[in-house]
Amino acid sequence: MSHPAKTSTTPKLEPAIIVIFGITGDLSARYLLPSLYHLIKDSLLHEQTEILGITRGDTTTEELFQKVELCVNEIDKVCDPDALAAMHEHTQMFQMDLDDAKAYEKLRQKLDAIEEQKGVCMNRLYYLSIPPQAYLSVIKLLGSADLNDSCQHNKASTRLLVEKPFGFDTASAQGLINETSKVFDEGQVFRIDHYVAKETVQNILVFRFNNPIFEALWDKDHIASIDIAAYGKIGIEGRALFYEPLGALRDLIQSHLLQILAIITMDQPDVLDSEHIHAAKQAALDKVQPVPADQVSELAVRGQYEGYRDEVKNPNSTTETYASITVYIDSPRWQGVPINISTGKALNERKTEVTVTFHNPPDPNSNRLRFRIQPNEGIELDLVTKKPGYVQELQTTAMDFTYLNDFARDGHPSAYERVLVDAVRGDHTLFATSEEVLASWRVVQPVLDVWSKQSDDLLAYKQGSGGPV
Ligand code: BG6
């Protein structure tokens, strides 16, 4: 095999102030700060970039970096002293009470002062890494303090980055979208779905549309079923406040996994650019049939791992830590093909993958195409082959593309690095539009409604097992 290829390069970014609301939180420690460290280490951010961490308390930068494993994404897990020093130099903390309108005035002065000191216009990114219940109030207060304005510093852009969940059901998502649009234009809003930013998920589009041999088979006449699964070994790991009002259906299926479904089933756009990809995804999601309320007991399963209730200190919790639904697409291309979507925590394996099973294989295990999103990212096709020897014995083997074999290990951006770079350069392709978010809520809404009224179908499962039986 040839040498692993280098990954593609990144365009030069503009100077930016990345304002992180909730910098001391779990998401920031796990994903954002290690990603920012890596981007700084690889000199991908403009040298004038500044990170402003918003915190209620009086945590200093030193204290923050002592608690966070900044170099967890590095191959050797070792920090580079120069990169670390640069990260310190470009990060500062700003203490404010998120409910205090006056604090937002001070924030504006702070941002103006940073720009003045640097002598350049900077893109301003407000990253909401805070409990979703607080989004609306923060967005409104940003607006009241004119922090939404793109023109205050001439040329640069102001952007809002929001983590999922966007709302808790169809109605609240619509409310959040309406209220946000009074403060930020749709073009300023970047709704993060970090699964879409994972390399293998992006590769699904390239695989489908640049290898016509597969696109020719991409319909109900050739595909029997599609399985989209995201399983984790870990539980909720202390995130009770975040997880308890959500559950697995809202946390992963409504967002990440329905985005993947759209990418797997959408029609080929005329051009592979942001506008056309979003239009094609939107059309795909609009055709997904919401799970019918009277079929929820057949088409949806939920479970909760044993010990969860103690963890969240709620003996009556009915929050599901495992969920699966089967949906169908109402289109001539996909009529009758079941799409099974499942996710769970505290299971016996960590695996996120999409399996496309073709019709009538000679061996039931053959002719499956698998997109391995994590771990061991790659794409594999199961094929029946003859075992070497004098007798006609068959065996299923895989034709396997594995990132680790074909690409250099260190050139592969993590999903959050990609999210941050794309937000700084204003590329919306990998972010969810308001219409996609609403279409996804509509698919799961009947299940949410039925589950909110009953709980006798919540199945207990053992931690470390394969999920509810
Ligand atoms: C988040 C969910 O969006 O994705 C978490 O809120 C989940 O519950 C996480 O564990 C999984 O992300 P990844 O990239 O580690 O698979």
Image: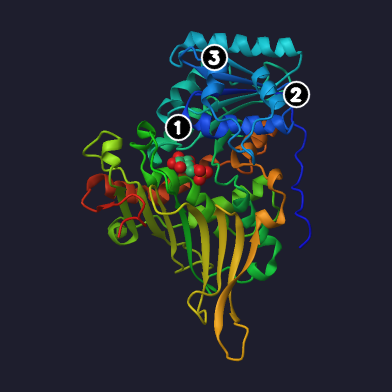
Q: Is residue 50 left or right of residue 241?
A: right
The kind of secondary structure element at disc 2 is loop
Picture coordinates of residue 303, whole percent (x, y): 30, 51
Amino acid identity at mark 3: Thr
Residue 402 sits in quarter: bottom right
Considering depth in this image, is 432 or 252 the residue closer to the camera? 252
SS category of the residue bearing label 3: loop
For label 2, the residue is: 47
Q: Residue 60 carries which label?
A: 3
Q: In which quarter of the image is the N terminus?
A: bottom right
Residue under pointer 1: 176
- Label 2 vs label 3, nearer the camera: 3
Report whether residue 123 is seen.
no
> Mark 1 belongs to which amino acid?
Leu
| Circle 3/circle 1 CB separation < 8 Å | no
Residue at the spot x=45%, y=11% of the render? Answer: 100
The tag on residue 269 is none
| Vertical placement of residue 240 versus 198, above or below | above
